[in-house]
Image (spheres, rainbow, N blue to C red):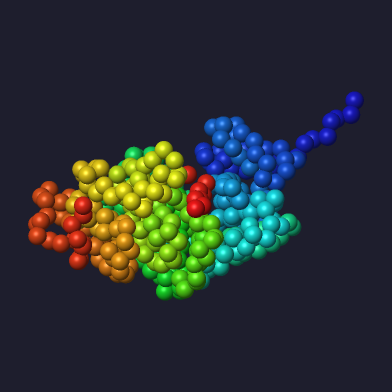
Amino acid sequence: MENSPRKSLKMVSCPACQAKQFIPGDLAPLERVACTKCGKWVMMPMMLRQYELRSEIASGGMGTVYRAWDTALHREVAVKLMKKEFAEDEAAVNSFAVEARACAQVNHTNIIHIYTFDYHEGYRFLAMEIADDGTLDSRIEKGGTVPELDVLDTGIKVAGALQAALKRGLLHLDIKPGNILFSDDGEPKVVDFGLAKKADAETDAYAPIFGTPYYIAPERVRQEGDTFLCDIYSLAGTLYHALTGHVPFEAPSVEDVVAAHLAIPLKPASDVNAAVSRPTSDALSRAMAKDPRERFQSYDEFIMALTAARSQVLIRQLTGREPDPGVVATPGAAPASPTRSWWRR
C-alpha cells in the first residue's frame, strides 16, 4: 500500500498568545485558521516586496492593516493593504495616495511615519510606523473615561502634531478618537490623513462634507471655509469625549447631531463629569466655541491653555489640595457658559 503524500506545514506564531504552531502549508496567503492554544486567528503570512505580513491589526471599509516584518531593515512595521476591489478605482486610489503623501510631508513624533507607498502584484499598500497599543477610542470604550492627565498629555501632543502639519500647509479635517493611535511606549500618533487638504484650498460650496459628525466644526457644516480652527474644534471635541465618556452632542440621528453643533450650547465638561477640573473644562469650551473667532487663534494658545490646566491637575494630585483659583488656565478665555462616517447637506 502506497503512503499518502505528506502535507506541507508552515510554522507561525499566534499574535494573541504567542504560541508557535504548524498550520497547513497549502493555505492561501492571508487565509486564517484558529489557534490550537487560544482559539484566536492565526494567518498564513504573505510577502509584499520586502514586507512579510504576519497578522491582522484592524480592518476598515477600503483596507486592512497588518503587522509585518521588514526583511530588509529587520524591524516591525504596519502595512495598510488596499482591498483589491478598490485597487483600480481612481477615486479610492487617489484617497489612498492623499493619505500617504500628506503624512510623508510632515516629520513629527506624533504623526505616523510613512515608509513607502507602492503597488505590487495587484496590491496597493502603505508601509508605515507601527502603533498598535490601541486607539483613544478603545481607551474610552474600555474605561468609560480617560484620566484627565492622560487626556491633557494627549491633547498637547496632538495639537503640536497638527501645528506641524499646518506649517506644511495641511489640515487634517477628521480628528476623532479613532484616529489617535498609541505606540507601545505610550506616544499618541495621528493617523488617517485621507481627508487632508491644503490650508489655502478654496471651498467648493456644492461638494459633499466628509468628516465625523460627532466632532465636526460648525463652519464646516455651513461650508464657510476650512481652517486650522476646524481641527482645533474637532480635537477639543475628541478630548471632551475622552474626559466625559460622552460625545459633545448626543442625538438620535446624524442630522440632529450636526444641527446641535450649529445651534445647541455646549455643556461644559465639568458639568458632565464633576471630576474634570475647571481650567480643562474652560479650555475645551473655548476651543469649541460656535464662532471660530471666539476660539484660540493659534495652536500655541491652545497648547498653553492645556499645559496650564495640566499644571493645575498635577498640583491637585501631588498636594491633595485644590490649586489657587486665581490662577488662570485659559489665557484670555471668556467664562464657559465608529468606520469613517460622513454627512452631506
Residue at 43% x, 59% y is 222
The residue lying toward the viewer, choosing from 185 and 300, is 300
Residue at 59% x, 47% y is 61
Q: Is residue 41 left or right of residue 142?
A: right
The residue lying toward the viewer, choosing from 311 and 303, is 303
- Which residue is the extreme one toward the right? 1
Q: Is residue 49 visible?
A: no
Q: Is residue 116 visible?
A: yes
The residue lying toward the viewer, choosing from 146 and 129, is 146
Residue at 65% x, 39% y is 32
Tell me where residue 221 sits by quadrant: bottom left
Residue at 31% x, 48% y is 264
The residue lying toward the viewer, choosing from 216 and 119, is 216
Is 166 rendered above or below residue 245?
A: below
Q: Is residue 212 left or right of residue 247?
A: right
Q: Position of residue 121 (x, y in %)?
A: 74, 57
- Say how many tags the image has: 0
Q: Position of residue 287 (x, y in %)?
A: 30, 59
Location of the N terminus by quadrant is top right
Is 320 rendered above or below residue 228?
A: above
Q: Position of residue 325 (x, y in %)?
A: 10, 56
Q: Position of residue 217 (x, y in %)?
A: 39, 57
Is 220 rendered above or below residue 249?
A: below
